[in-house]
Amino acid sequence: MSTIAVGSDHGGFTLKGRLADELRSLGYEVIDLGTHSDDRVDYPDFGAAVGRAVAGGEAELGVCVCGSGIGIAMAANKVPGVRAATVHDATSARLAREHTDANVLCLGERLLDPEVASVAVRAWLGAEFEGGRHVGRVAKLAELDGSGT
Ligand code: RB5
């Protein structure tokens, strides 16, 4: 089973813990890169940590949570090789995998019902990259950040 790196700022701390527990119960190995309390911190630190874990191969996938799911996605996407997607439901999560092969999923604790977030994560994990017409587009993303082969 794959290893999944998880990270959040204070705005995503509670949901990150819940999702980490669920991922463990599904059999995934989870690397929790923090934050480890609800003390105020900066989301770029944790988005970057998850992005580096995924791009560096310590984890196959990453899950990031902040208040909106936006800032932490911006941070993760600064790491070459990361395709982080902010999603709001099962459909956007599934498409993030099927069309864009997102390797980091980002969610907003202040915007999402926790059950919706759980269902979204499971939809993403259960989906597969469709390939085909999407391959060249994902390759162009890699060209943009210099991570393409
Ligand atoms: C923190 O207050 C909040 O700005 C952060 O969690 C996130 O929503 C940023 O995109």
Image: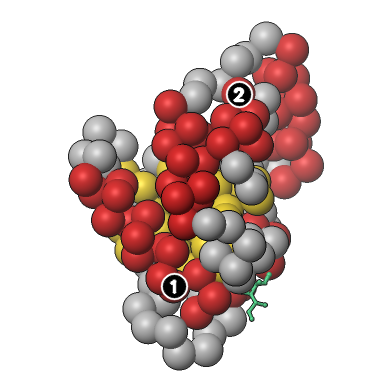
The residue sitting at 27% across, 56% down in the picture is 21
**Image quadrant in which the N terminus is located:** top left
Foreground: disc 1 or disc 2 = 1
The residue sitting at 46% across, 41% down in the picture is 119
Q: Amino acid at mark 2?
A: Glu
Q: Position of residue 117 (x, y in %)?
A: 50, 50
Q: Disc 2 beta carbon < 8 A from ligand 1?
A: no
Against 82, is 107 above or below?
below
Against 95, is 146 above or below?
below
Q: Which numbered marker is on residue 83? A: none
Q: Are marks 1 and 2 in contact (CB under 8 Å)?
A: no
Residue 53 seen: no
The residue sitting at 42% across, 37% down in the picture is 122
Dot 2 alpha-carbon crowd within 10 angstroms: few under 14, some 14 to 19, many 20 or more:
some
Against 38, is 59 above or below?
above
Q: Which residue is mark 2?
A: 98
The residue sitting at 55% across, 65% down in the picture is 109
Q: How many marks?
A: 2
Q: Earlier in the sequence, mark 1 or mark 2?
A: 1
Q: Position of residue 29 (x, y in %)?
A: 24, 47
Dot 1 alpha-carbon crowd within 10 angstroms: few under 14, some 14 to 19, many 20 or more:
many
**Image quadrant in which the C terminus is located:** top right
Q: Position of residue 146 (x, y in %)?
A: 70, 43
Element under label 1?
helix
Which quadrant does ligand 1 occupy? bottom right
- Drawn side of residue 31 relative to residue 41, left or right: left
- Drawn side of residue 131 relative to residue 63, left or right: right
Q: Which numbered marker is on residue 13? A: 1
Q: Amino acid at mark 1?
A: Phe
Q: Position of residue 71 (x, y in %)?
A: 68, 67
Q: CA distance from mark 1 to mark 2?
A: 28 Å
Residue 146 seen: yes
